[in-house]
Amino acid sequence: MKIFIVGLGLIGASYAEGLKEKGHRVYGYDQDKTTMAKAKVQNIIEKDTSINDIETADLVIIALYPEATIAFLKAHQHRFNRSQTLSDVCGIKTWLLTEIERFLPAQLNYTSHHPMAGKETPGFDAKDKTLFKDANFLIVKTAKTHKRDLERLEHIANDLNFGQISLLTPQKHDALIAYTSQLTHVMASSLILSSKDDDAIKATGNSFRDLTRIAKIHPPLWSELFLNNKTPLLQAISQFKQALSEIESLLERDDEAGLKQFLKNAKKRRESYD
Amino acid sequence: MKIFIVGLGLIGASYAEGLKEKGHRVYGYDQDKTTMAKAKVQNIIEKDTSINDIETADLVIIALYPEATIAFLKAHQHRFNRSQTLSDVCGIKTWLLTEIERFLPAQLNYTSHHPMAGKETPGFDAKDKTLFKDANFLIVKTAKTHKRDLERLEHIANDLNFGQISLLTPQKHDALIAYTSQLTHVMASSLILSSKDDDAIKATGNSFRDLTRIAKIHPPLWSELFLNNKTPLLQAISQFKQALSEIESLLERDDEAGLKQFLKNAKKRRESYD
């Protein structure tokens, strides 16, 4: 496949490296000249790549932040044609697809997807083609999705060694992500800021470090993600607070049997995720 | 040193294995006969060990759950003498030491400690002498603590490859632990139970799995720990809820600058824990 990747940050560069290795012709673009030079030298994109290659690619993946994804598509929409599959890797979909729908010519094929993998370090140098091993791969299916688009996305998901591939509506995607990804980041950041005691470092164990590692996220990206998925996220926070209040009230009432049952239910449900 | 370990579960057996390897004479006791047999065959305690060895040990470590620790000390208090250092590995201290004070003869030397390491799997077979590498080691210093007791505990902490050793009062220990350990377990269990959507498994990433792994804790132990440290834990939950409400209100107000600042502060503070 001829694949064009826009944005050679952590995700874009990891995609490029993994897909080039599997024999695809990978072209790319990054606004940072040093990144472009490195990508060519390291042979993860074709040496003669130019922005014009976007017009002949089978699959175009925009690997930018949500607002930048929209801006890029708007600026380059005249370059696309209906034989191509257009996609992005953004972490939020309802808002994104509504925005894109406003301007993208109706005959183009747009199918968003979301690779459920990442790390705290952003940028080209953090790239890692093994990042996606066994990770969940979410495809957002809409009226603009055709069989060929699904096949192309499934093809790269397999080549990048993703695990389960799921098809979701934008709304379902955003509700699930609010719970499994955004809420966990909100929790980690809140936990870190909830104590001002500098002695806490003396008493940390693995659980604290594991749970708060994601507080090292990139603030500009995540504030964009949170604000553009505000309703599902507030809903997820509210449901979490309810569960927290339940355990709080068991403690206040010294309800040992109830507390044990709560922890047992949690343990059982967590085991179903393994 | 002659060391006697009561309870050869995850912590007791890991201690025994690590300390035996460093040349200590390690004796032990477990109420489970199969565990005792395994411990002897695997040579992590002396083959001729008997409960009477507790009377001639320099250091006695009770590695049982909090309530069982108290019951054991009460039943065996006549066996101890003032040349020994008595200790335990419980995760809560104020309540524990108050209970022990009620009956333990005043001339005995009791210095509690807390190894900040563990895993979800309990029991002898889960033992791992590398579990403590670079982990925090908390010594709870009281009027019953003498120089020799500190030296003995620091000695084993070094032999087990612990990292930082800190001396804390029981109250300070419990406040820190409520934040760094108990609250994280409360959060993980609450998060798991806060969604009933079985599709969530399709959308989990590493952050969700890391953050909820500790929901697989042993309910009987943790309900004991939570209930006997109720006040500091409720305080930690309340502070966490305040931080959570702060981020909730930033979202509701669409305060992008405020949200970015919140995440930036969290990131900075988390980095100080590395």
Image (cartoon, coloured by chain):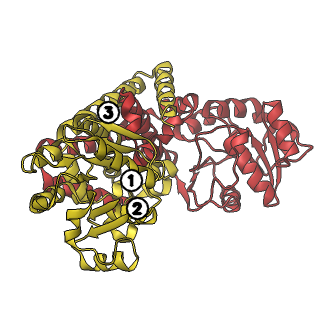
Chain colours: A yellow, B red
Measure how far apart labels 1 and 3 are at the Cα level: 35 Å
Name the kind of residue labelled 1 in the image: Ile
Q: CA distance from mark 2 to mark 3?
A: 39 Å
Q: Secondary structure at mark 1?
A: helix
User: Where does the image place residue B194, in percent across and percent down from the top left?
Assistant: 35, 30
Check the residue under mark 1 and report the chain it is in: A
Q: Is residue A122 left or right of residue A235?
A: right
Residue, disc 2: A19
Identified by mark 2, the residue type is Leu
Q: Which residue is mark 1?
A: A156
Tell me the amino acid under the disc marked 3: Phe
Q: Earlier in the sequence, mark 2 or mark 3?
A: 2
Crowd band around label 3 with a 10 angstrom C-alpha radius: few (<14), some (14–19), many (20+): many
Q: Identify the secondary structure beneath mark 3.
A: helix
From the image, tell me which residue sits under label 3: A240
- Image quarter where the C terminus of chain B lies is bottom left
Chain letter of the residue beneath label 2 in the structure image: A
